[in-house]
């Protein structure tokens, strides 16, 4: 009977925290991609998962490509000494299941595939990371490995069975057996010191099978170790009438200096000398992995999320973990999140969007990233105004767009992205100022870290002053809208994070999205100062918030019933993206402050409802949510934030009144991006990936499962 999948097949990350690595698979007809500091899907190996009852009675899961696995040595040997063709490969000898025969279930921590009487499970617990300023790093939390289980139910058979979990390597180099490098401790295979598939050996029960062609050995249940060819893995015996489980670990390792500009090593190299030690540690702590995975999955399930939100969250936390890197440098622990295929280090845009997940899981990460910025990637700026050509004014404190690219930290005070006089890589000084405010306030309020807030009072005051200076150098002319532009732009102009999405959202000056984010930033600063007991500063920040909220009314088009995308430009573009800045203040519990003005609330809700008219920000062809009515380039991560704001601030039941939006969002992440892994730029009309694959930002979906008062275990 044909089985229906509860979760579609797509390439999925299975990633330890802080290792910048992922065992990526999940699409039938494709193998695994071993992504170690390489954010992109490649054909690293066929994944061989099988159960055999002897020759002609072997079933295998369909995670393999059609590439022939014979190597030249075996072909030549067969021809020279036996005068014939090499023996048939496992793909030719075994019954490989079709996609409709396998059932998949994906949760935040477990990815399970079931075929006949056996199932493969990959467990990724997303452990909490201890605050390095308080305690020594936990070996468990930073272990660069994930756990795999192959469970075989042989209770209904009168024949003994052999289970096999292994791979046919397709890359450069040659896999080796772990038995030779860790005698008696591990069995399995690996590639040099970079990665390993390992299990704890058990005499006559769990063992390595490694050879040119492993098919016959698996069928016969034989322990064979030969260094020819590229096939190998772990076999285990299941007696007739019994059920047994093989527990394995897939580990990653990069030794030595891994960053430049600031020279750092992976933190996991402190407790683990090599990949074998990491795998052995995880295997001996497998019960904790199972327990942690069960606890986190149960808690997320208890939220009662609809399927679309539950599966999207489960997929997104994996993508986030795959992009994380925890290093030690100059006696400090530095946390980095890479920007997917683009590889920017700790992009400030993403740092603000990741807040709901990081604050609920590892609050110190927010503090760590922010302090890296404050120590090295801030600068005191000068600004210019369009109506005063040639005149320069103090701009105050701001942040770079990022800290560098891939493995290299950029020089102090400079990002890797921004360039003067550029039309393509413009400065985002104003938006990064707003993002910096988000991070500073969100950490202090969520962690209730009053000592840290007191320590950073001076920075908070500088950020408020920077807001005011970018509004206008003359206090009498301030209206809450940021018009000052960094002189670092040169002949270029300040842009926003949406520069590649829509022409209506490129320019910072007059931008509706920047205006709503300015309002939120001023509100956040007011709340920070209240928390720190600074009433005068709080009143000053609140005054700016009030001015911005009042000026937002100027964007409203009464005839069209929406807020214009840019106050100083013509056009009828509707941008639902303008509401996403409200998500973090909502997470922090500031809904009363956001809804304090009923007149503004009515304008905002009118704007949202106009955007939700089909053909505006709802794609006329597919019903997917567009961030802008005039662009088919839409971003799932930002769509998540917009949906959350619609529901929590505007009172719209998206699941009930606009169910197609959630269905299409899930389609983008599971079907559109099936080959590339979760991607953050989608053509809403064609339902295809534009770019931003291997991307972490859709962890914004954490707003659906927790807030500052309700976090996860």
Image (spheres, rainbow, N blue to C red):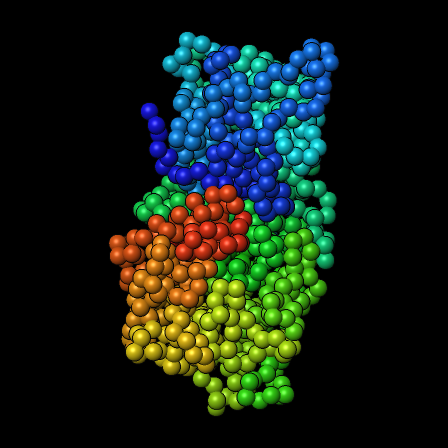
Residue 19, picture quadrant: top right
Q: Residue at x 46, y 31 (%)?
A: 121
Q: Residue at x 38, y 74 (%)?
A: 572
Residue 642, position in %: x, y? 39, 61
Residue 98, position in %: x, y? 43, 28
Residue 342, position in %: x, y? 59, 55
Q: Is residue 174 left or right of residue 707?
A: right
Identify whether 355 is placed above or below 151.
Answer: below
Question: Is residue 197 at least partly visible in the picture?
Answer: no
Task: Determine the residue located farthest toward the top in the rendered image.
Answer: 158
Using the image as rendered, state which of residue 455 and residue 517 is in the foreground: 517
Using the image as rendered, state which of residue 367 and residue 218 is in the foreground: 218
Identify whether 428 is placed above or below 4.
Answer: below
Residue 435, position in %: x, y? 52, 67
User: How many numbered marks, from 0 up?
Assistant: 0
Q: Residue at x 48, y 37 (%)?
A: 27
Question: Is residue 244 at least partly visible in the picture?
Answer: yes
The quarter of the image holding the N terminus is top left
Using the image as rendered, state which of residue 630 and residue 490 is in the foreground: 630
Q: Residue at x 56, y 74 (%)?
A: 494
Q: Is residue 453 left or right of residue 562?
A: right
Identify whether 471 is placed above or below 406.
Answer: below
């Amino acid at each position: 009977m044909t089985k229906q999948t509860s979760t579609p097949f797509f390439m999925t990350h299975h990633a330890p925290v802080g290792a910048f690595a992922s065992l990526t698979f999940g699409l039938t007809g494709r193998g695994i991609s071993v992504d170690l500091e390489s954010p992109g899907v490649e054909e690293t190996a066929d994944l061989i998962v099988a159960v055999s009852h002897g020759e002609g009675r072997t079933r295998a899961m369909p995670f393999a490509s059609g590439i022939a696995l014979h190597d030249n040595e075996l072909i030549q040997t067969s021809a020279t000494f036996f005068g014939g063709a090499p023996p048939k490969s496992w793909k030719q000898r075994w019954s490989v299941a079709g996609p409709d025969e396998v059932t998949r279930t994906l949760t935040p921590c477990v990815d399970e595939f079931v075929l006949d009487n056996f199932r493969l499970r990959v467990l990724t617990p997303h452990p909490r990371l201890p605050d390095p300023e308080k305690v020594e790093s936990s070996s468990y939390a930073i272990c660069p490995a994930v756990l795999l289980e192959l469970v075989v139910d042989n209770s209904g058979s009168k024949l003994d069975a052999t289970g096999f979990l292994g791979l046919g390597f397709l890359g450069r180099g040659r896999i080796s057996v772990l038995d030779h490098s860790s005698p008696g401790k591990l069995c399995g295979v690996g590639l040099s010191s970079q990665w390993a598939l390992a299990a704890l050996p058990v005499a006559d029960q769990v063992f390595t099978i490694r050879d040119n062609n492993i098919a016959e050995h698996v069928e016969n249940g034989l322990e064979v170790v030969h260094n020819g060819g590229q096939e190998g893995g772990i076999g285990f015996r299941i007696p007739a009438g019994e059920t047994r489980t093989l527990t394995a670990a897939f580990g990653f390792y990069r030794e030595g200096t891994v960053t430049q500009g600031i020279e750092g090593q992976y933190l996991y190299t402190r407790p683990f000398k090599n990949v074998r030690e990491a795998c052995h540690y995880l295997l001996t702590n497998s019960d904790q992995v199972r327990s942690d995975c069960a606890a986190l999955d149960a808690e997320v399930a208890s939220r009662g999320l609809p399927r679309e939100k539950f599966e999207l969250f489960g997929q997104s936390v994996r993508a986030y973990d795959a992009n994380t890197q925890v290093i030690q440098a100059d006696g400090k622990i530095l946390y980095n999140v890479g920007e997917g295929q683009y590889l920017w280090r700790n992009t400030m845009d993403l740092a603000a969007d990741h807040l709901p997940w990081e604050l609920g899981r590892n609050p110190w990460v927010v503090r760590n990233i922010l302090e890296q910025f404050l120590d090295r990637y801030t600068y005191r700026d000068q600004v210019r105004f369009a109506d005063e050509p040639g005149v320069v004014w103090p701009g105050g404190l701001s942040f770079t767009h990022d800290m560098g690219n891939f493995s290299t930290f950029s020089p102090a005070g400079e990002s890797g992205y921004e360039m003067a006089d550029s039309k393509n890589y413009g400065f985002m000084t104003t938006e990064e100022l707003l993002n910096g405010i988000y991070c500073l306030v969100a950490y202090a309020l969520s962690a209730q870290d009053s000592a840290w807030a007191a320590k950073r009072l001076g920075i908070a005051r500088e950020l408020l002053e920077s807001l005011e200076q970018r509004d206008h150098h003359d206090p009498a002319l301030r209206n809450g809208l940021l018009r000052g532009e960094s002189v670092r732009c040169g002949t270029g102009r300040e842009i926003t994070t949406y520069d590649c999405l829509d022409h209506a959202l490129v320019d910072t000056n007059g931008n509706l999205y920047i205006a709503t984010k300015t309002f939120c930033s001023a509100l956040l600063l007011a709340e920070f100062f209240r928390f720190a007991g600074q009433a005068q500063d709080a009143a000053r920040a609140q005054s700016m918030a009030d001015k911005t909220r009042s000026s937002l009314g100027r964007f409203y088009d009464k005839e069209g019933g929406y807020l214009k995308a840019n106050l100083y430009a013509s056009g009828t573009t509707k941008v639902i993206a303008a509401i996403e800045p409200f998500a973090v203040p909502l997470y922090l519990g500031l809904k009363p402050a956001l809804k304090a003005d009923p007149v503004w609330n009515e304008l905002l809700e009118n704007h949202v409802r106009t955007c939700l008219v089909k053909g505006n920000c709802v794609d006329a062809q597919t019903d997917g949510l567009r961030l802008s009515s005039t662009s088919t380039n839409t971003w799932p991560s930002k769509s998540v934030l917009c949906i959350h704001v619609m529901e929590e601030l505007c009172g719209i039941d998206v699941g009930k009144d606009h169910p197609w939006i959630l269905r299409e969002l899930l389609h983008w992440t599971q079907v559109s991006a099936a080959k590339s892994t979760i991607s953050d730029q989608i053509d809403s009309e064609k339902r295809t990936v534009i770019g931003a694959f291997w991307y972490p930002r859709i962890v914004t979906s954490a707003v659906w499962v927790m807030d500052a008062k309700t976090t996860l275990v």
